[in-house]
Image: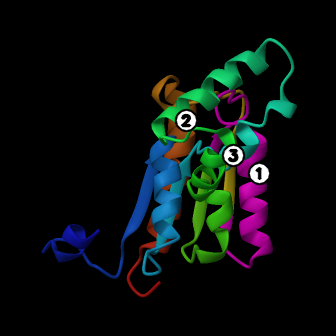
Amino acid sequence: LVHLRKHPRVDPERIGLLGFSKGAMLSLLIASREVKLKAVVAYYPLADFEEWLDLNRYSFPKSLLVRGMRRYFMNQLQASTWEEARPMLRAASPIHSVERIQAPVLLIHGEKDRTAPLEQVQNLCGTLRAAGKRCDLLIVPSAGHVFNFRDEEQGKIAWEATMKFLDHHLQEGS
């Protein structure tokens, strides 16, 4: 953002973020630290790692997969126990940064996403709204994770909503 704000072709007062999946999570986390951003568009983000990796949510055999994902994240975070990893995963979860996000947010998610649960973005949007923040949610019917790279029509629906949202929020004087 420092480089972008200094670029001669960029109006530093009209910057928005756009991210997909992990990039969507990062865009939301950046927005929680950068109050001058004018808009965030987040495609199919995971909003809450703790909930996503909660073993009590899953039955066998999916619980085995979740145990493996927990070990993966513990290794990535260099945590020796799940309890040691939890605060770091909490800090990486946009749902816990809602109070600091000032920019309007557009969440775009596939109805049938099995990677990042739809319920998480619905909860994130509801939490943003309850905190007095602007959040729009576009649920793309019958779409899964990374739908916009797999289905031209679904991608077109999402991209049109993205451009409309960014055009509105990045206008001069908005």
Of badges 2 and 1, nearer the viewer stands 2
Q: Residue at x 26, y 78 (%)?
A: 11
As for residue 112 lying within the magenta part, the answer is: yes
**Residue under label 3:** 83
The CA distance from mark 2 to mark 3 is: 12 Å
Outermost residue toward the bottom in this view: 173
Q: Amino acid at mark 3?
A: Glu
Q: Position of residue 141 (x, y in %)?
A: 72, 33
**Residue under label 1:** 122
State whether residue 146 appears in this view. Answer: no
**Circle number at residue 73:** 2
Q: Position of residue 133 (x, y in %)?
A: 68, 75
State whether residue 56 appears in this view. Answer: yes
First along the sequence among labels 1 and 3 = 3
First along the sequence among labels 2 and 1 = 2
As for residue 93 lying within the magenta part, the answer is: no
Asked whether the residues under the numbered discs 2 and 1 touch, taking CB atoms below 8 Å apart as contact, a structural biologist would say no
Q: Residue at x 46, y 36 (%)?
A: 76
Q: Position of residue 74 (x, y in %)?
A: 56, 36
The CA distance from mark 2 to mark 1 is: 24 Å
Q: In terms of secondary structure, where does tag 2 sit?
A: helix
Span colored in magenta: 108-135
Q: Residues within 10 Å of mark 3 (few under 14, many from 20)?
A: few
Q: Is residue 104 above or below residue 21?
A: below
Q: Position of residue 93 (x, y in %)?
A: 61, 54
Q: In terms of secondary structure, where does tag 3 sit?
A: helix
